[in-house]
Image: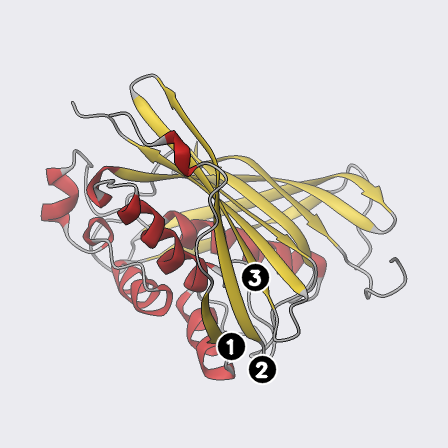
């Protein structure tokens, strides 16, 4: 997939449930109880269990792979965590929407700006990535 | 709380080696819902599995209460993708410490290298240590 400057990338929607948080805690080793227990989340002033910030970032990473058309296309990827993704109990959970646009393309590497929202509110800021959509090897 | 600024620039002993297996990549990819992800290549945020425990050592050494730590920023810069079969070592450095608005900010950089010592990915983590209420 060729990415062009100014191109809007198709938004990707991901559902996150509490079962996902348990799986992510196991796989990542981040067992902070604010991602697992309402009681602990309330005790630190949160409205309820929140998703791991790194899970939200990983979902944005899935969108990058989809847009790049390859699993190993991310050269650089950075975000700022600005707002927690609150995950209600039950099958519905929370919905994270990852949108993006190509800012520039330099030597085949696309600079992508991401907009990541939950319930219409931005949960990440300064979310940017550099993608190599074409096979690597021809530069440096 | 005033953190010990002498930690800036300090490199911590290498952790690992960490063996990247297909099983671990599969488990991580499944946990982020990327069931169509190939298990030869790690998803871009996978290195957190290695850098999180390394970062915790620094938090402990700084005497920071983990319950007051919030993840502020995260960045990955790849020299090449992490693939199954990699044997990675991780060296963590405290890159920046600052106090602002009653909170402390600590930026760590973890440099992951392969079995040949070649760079693979650098991982920056900025933690916000909330001041006592």
Instruction: Tell me whether circle 1 and circle 2 mark residues in contact (CB < 8 Å).
Output: yes
Q: Are marks 2 and 3 on the same chain?
A: yes
Quarter in which the N terminus of chain B is drawn:
top left
Q: Secondary structure at mark 3?
A: strand
In this view, the residue in front, A86 or A45, is A45
Res B98 quadrant in image: top left
Give the vertical position of B121 relative to B82 (above or below).
Answer: above
For marks 3 and 1 on the same chain, the one whose residue lies earlier in the sequence:
1
Marks 2, 3: nearer the viewer: 3
Task: Tell me the crowding category of disc 3: few under 14, some 14 to 19, or many 20 or more residues within 10 angstroms, Cα based.
Answer: many
Residue with the mark numbered 3? B112
Q: Secondary structure at mark 2?
A: loop
Q: Chain of mark 3?
A: B
Marks 3, 1: nearer the viewer: 3
In this view, the residue in front, A100 or A32, is A32
For marks 2 and 3 on the same chain, the one whose residue lies earlier in the sequence:
2
Residue with the mark numbered 2? B85
Give me the residue at 82% from left, 43% from top.
A105
Q: Chain of mark 1?
A: B
Residue A34: x and y in percent read 21, 48
Q: How is the image coloured?
A: secondary structure
Q: Chain of mark 2?
A: B
A48 lies left or right of A95: left
Give the vertical position of B27 relative to A94 (above or below).
Answer: below
Instruction: Tell me whether circle 3 and circle 1 mark residues in contact (CB < 8 Å).
Output: no
Task: Tell me the crowding category of disc 1: few under 14, some 14 to 19, or many 20 or more residues within 10 angstroms, Cα based.
Answer: many
Res A65 quadrant in image: bottom right
On residue B20, which mark appears? 1
Q: Secondary structure at mark 1?
A: loop
For marks 1 and 2 on the same chain, the one whose residue lies earlier in the sequence:
1
The extreme front residue here reads: B6
């Amino acid at each position: 997939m060729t990415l062009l400057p100014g191109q809007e990338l198709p938004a990707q929607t991901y559902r996150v449930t509490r079962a996902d948080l348990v799986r992510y805690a196991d796989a990542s080793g981040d067992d902070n109880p604010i991602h697992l227990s309402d009681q602990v989340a309330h005790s630190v002033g949160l409205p309820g269990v929140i998703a791991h910030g790194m899970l939200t970032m990983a979902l944005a990473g899935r969108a990058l792979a989809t847009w790049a058309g390859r699993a190993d296309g991310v050269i650089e990827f950075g975000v700022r965590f600005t707002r927690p993704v609150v995950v209600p109990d039950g099958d519905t959970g929370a919905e994270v929407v990852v949108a993006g646009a190509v800012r520039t393309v330099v030597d085949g590497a696309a600079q992508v700006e991401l907009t990541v929202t939950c319930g219409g509110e931005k949960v990440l800021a300064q979310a940017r990535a550099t993608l190599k959509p074409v096979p690597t090897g021809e530069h440096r | 709380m005033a953190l010990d600024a002498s930690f800036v620039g300090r490199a911590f002993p290498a952790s690992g080696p960490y063996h990247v297996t297909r099983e671990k990549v599969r488990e991580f990819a499944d946990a982020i819902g990327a069931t169509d992800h190939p298990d030869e290549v790690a998803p871009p945020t996978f290195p957190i599995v290695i850098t999180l425990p390394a970062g915790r050592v620094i938090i402990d050494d700084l005497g920071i209460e983990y319950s007051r730590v919030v993840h502020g920023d995260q960045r990955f810069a790849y020299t090449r993708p992490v693939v199954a079969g990699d044997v990675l070592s991780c060296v963590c450095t405290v890159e920046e410490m600052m106090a602002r608005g009653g909170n402390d900010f600590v930026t760590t950089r973890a440099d992951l290298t392969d079995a040949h010592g070649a760079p693979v990915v650098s991982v920056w983590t900025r933690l916000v240590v909330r001041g006592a209420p």
